[in-house]
């Protein structure tokens, strides 16, 4: 009879391990499915209306770096996680380093993401966070140059009507649109912190 609690404990540990492995596998599959082809990633200018007026990478100072991601405000998981990771990474930088970093999210859902909605969304993560809302043509142009893939998934039984699957990588970009580093999606900030410190120096 005394063995039963141990059996239950072993069962629960086994279930937790399976869930962890499934989560890791899901993240890996997500990255594989939506990982850009590096041969097609050229980067380049980003110019769109933003939550802080008309935005252009050329407005950055010489030593500034933009953390560019693509997402949308109705995204239930990956997008808020990406913004939270940016916020956590910025908190680990020195004051001097932090002043040189501009966190940006470009919406892949210009149909629903208005500038007022983006402003409210980005404000949740920090005053320095900038949301970009371009036309469909602007989005397609920038996404193609940055190797970003997205697709609309209809959800007729949901109040959202549709969701969007999309690439979740973060791009460290300078004022010339040169991609300095691409950081794969992760719910932890360590990879982004390492990439930023490498580019910003001490």
Image (cartoon, rainbow, N blue to C red):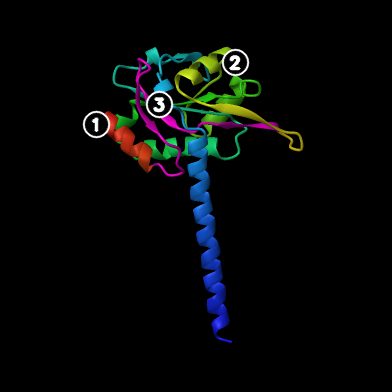
Image-based side of 101 in relation to 124, left or right: left
Could you say which is closer to the camera, residue 76 or residue 126?
Answer: 76
In terms of sequence position, does the residue under pointer 3 or pointer 2 come before the other?
3
Image-based side of 179 in relation to 32, left or right: left
The residue to which callout 3 is attached is 38
Q: Quadrant of the C terminus?
A: top left
Please tell me whether residue 177 belongs to the stretch shown in magenta. yes
The disc placed on residue 153 is none
In terms of sequence position, does the residue under pointer 2 or pointer 1 come before the other?
2
At 76% from the left and 34% from the top, the residue drawn is: 156
In terms of sequence position, does the residue under pointer 3 or pointer 1 come before the other?
3
Place residue 78 in its image quadrant: top right
The disc placed on residue 136 is 2
Disc 3 and disc 1 in contact, CB within 8 angstroms: no
Residue 131 screen position, x and y as percent: 52, 24
Is label 2 in a helix, a strand or a loop? Answer: helix
Closer to the observer: label 3 or label 2?
3
Residue 68 screen position, x and y as percent: 44, 26
Place residue 134 in its image quadrant: top right
Please tell me whether residue 135 belongs to the stretch shown in magenta. no
Distance Cα–Cα, label 3 vs label 2 = 23 Å
Distance Cα–Cα, label 2 vs label 1 = 37 Å
Residue 91 appearing in the image: no
Is label 1 in a helix, a strand or a loop? Answer: loop
The residue to which callout 1 is attached is 201
Residue 61 screen position, x and y as percent: 32, 17
Residue 95 screen position, x and y as percent: 31, 33
Distance Cα–Cα, label 3 vs label 1 = 25 Å
| Above or below 18: residue 3 | below
Disc 3 and disc 2 in contact, CB within 8 angstroms: no
Image-based side of 177 in relation to 8, left or right: left
Q: Which residues are magenta?
A: 161-189
């Amino acid at each position: 009879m005394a063995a039963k609690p141990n059996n239950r404990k072993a069962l629960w540990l086994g279930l937790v391990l399976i869930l962890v492995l499934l989560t890791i596998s899901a993240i890996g599959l997500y990255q594989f499915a939506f990982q850009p082809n590096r041969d097609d990633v050229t980067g380049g200018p980003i110019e769109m209306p933003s939550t802080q007026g008309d935005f252009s990478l050329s407005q950055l100072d010489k030593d500034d770096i933009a953390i560019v991601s693509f997402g949308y405000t109705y995204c239930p998981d990956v997008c808020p996680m990406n913004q939270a990771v940016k916020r956590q990474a910025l908190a680990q930088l020195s004051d001097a380093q932090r002043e040189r970093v501009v966190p940006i999210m470009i919406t892949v859902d210009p149909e629903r993401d208005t500038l007022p909605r983006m402003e409210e969304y980005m404000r949740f993560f920090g005053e320095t966070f900038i949301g970009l809302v371009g036309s469909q043509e602007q989005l397609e142009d920038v996404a193609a140059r940055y190797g970003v893939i997205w697709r609309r998934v209809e959800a007729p039984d949901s109040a959202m009507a549709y969701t969007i699957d999309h690439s979740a990588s973060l791009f460290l970009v300078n004022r010339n649109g040169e991609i300095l580093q691409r950081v794969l999606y992760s719910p932890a900030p360590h990879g982004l912190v390492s990439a930023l410190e490498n580019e910003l120096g001490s």
